[in-house]
Image (cartoon, rainbow, N blue to C red):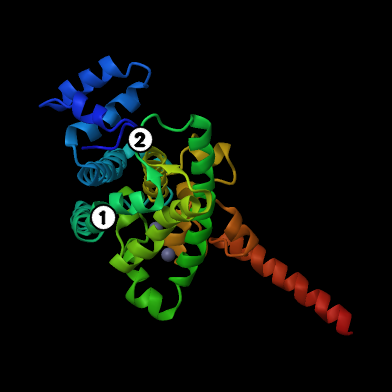
Amino acid sequence: MSAVFTNSTLSSFVRDRTYSGTVHNVQLLQPQLSAVEQYWAAWYAYMANDVLATGIMFFVLHEAVYFGRSLPWFIIDQIPYFRRYKIQATKIPSSKEQWHCLKSVVLSHFLVEAIPIWTFHPLCEKLGISAQVPFPSWKTVAWEISLFFLLEDMWHYWVHRFLHYGVFYKYIHKQHHRYAAPFGLTAEYAHPMETMTLGLGTVGMPILYVLYTGHLHLFTLCVWISLRLFQAVDSHSGYDFPWSLNKFLPFWSGAEHHDLHHHYFIGNYASSFRWWDYCMDTEAGPEAKLAREEKMRARACRMAKKSS
Ligand SMILES: [Zn+2]
Ligand SMILES: [Zn+2]
């Protein structure tokens, strides 16, 4: 029996032999719920096993969003018109490169990410992450996701910077840097240790949040993970359009920021925003290098004047 409704007997009451039949029953008996809430509740009631329902939902969501978002970038790579927006215009990924990356990412999804996905619901129950309907208000969802973006970015900056040191780079992070000109699919092309440590920013921050506040909804996590996947795939797309988000939100990193990281192998360590690299003086690229050198020269001049 599912715990998706506050009244637990309701889930077995609405359950039908088919998912569409269950949706129909929920629509009849719970008309006050939104359409998304009705489909959500029907899924849990139909499955009658919350662990399996959450596991399958998260796995399918991850695959659908990741590959669904990578596909348009793959198509764009085949159309010469879009070369004018390609950041490293001469470096179009070959079919062989794309195929190698696809195989590796699929394997990693099944081997590395399948296990945490299947054990996620019991963890949620322990932590108090709710899967019940109705969902929290959009205001709550928006505020929590904004906070997760900020916290994940901070985690990503420091862990990523750390992964560029000596043995950590050699044995872990080097795999992700195989492609100096990234493409959408390369977002999760990484060593399993990297997937786990950087992935902790995506999953660990909401866990810290629920430990502190005592409330979080699984639906918020679904939206958060989808948006975070969009951000990761887009930042690896290799394209910077006049309508890209970073043109409207100057603090948003976007593909232009992360492409420079792959190109120069150094600097621009953050994921979503530019402020950590700006404040810690780790911006990548020739312009940032010039500005850094200029700053160092000015400092040296000041020191020389002081001592003379
Ligand atoms: Zn890196
Ligand atoms: Zn990358």
Mark 2 or mark 1: which is in front? 2
Q: Which quadrant holds the C terminus? A: bottom right
Can residue 269 be seen here? Answer: no
Q: Residue 129: percent from the left, percent from the top?
A: 39, 46
The residue that disc 2 covers is 132
Is the residue marked by circle 2 packed among few (<14), some (14-19), or many (20+) residues within 10 Å?
Answer: some
- Amino acid carrying label 1: it is Thr
Work out whether 295 lies above or below 143: below
Q: Which mark is residue 119?
A: 1
Find numbered disc 2 in the image and state the secondary structure of the residue it sits on. Answer: loop
Residue 131, image quadrant: top left
Whether residue 163 is visible, yes or no, is: yes
- CA–CA distance between discs 2 and 1? 18 Å
Q: Please say if the residues under marks 2 and 1 sit with CB atoms less than 8 Å apart.
A: no
**Drawn side of residue 227 relative to residue 245, left or right:** left
Please state the horizontal and vertical placement of residue 247, each as a whole percent of the image. 55, 39
Q: Residue at x 49, y 34 (%)?
A: 243
Local secondary structure at mark 1: loop
Is residue 149 or residue 279 the one in the foreground?
149
Residue type, mark 2 in image: Gln
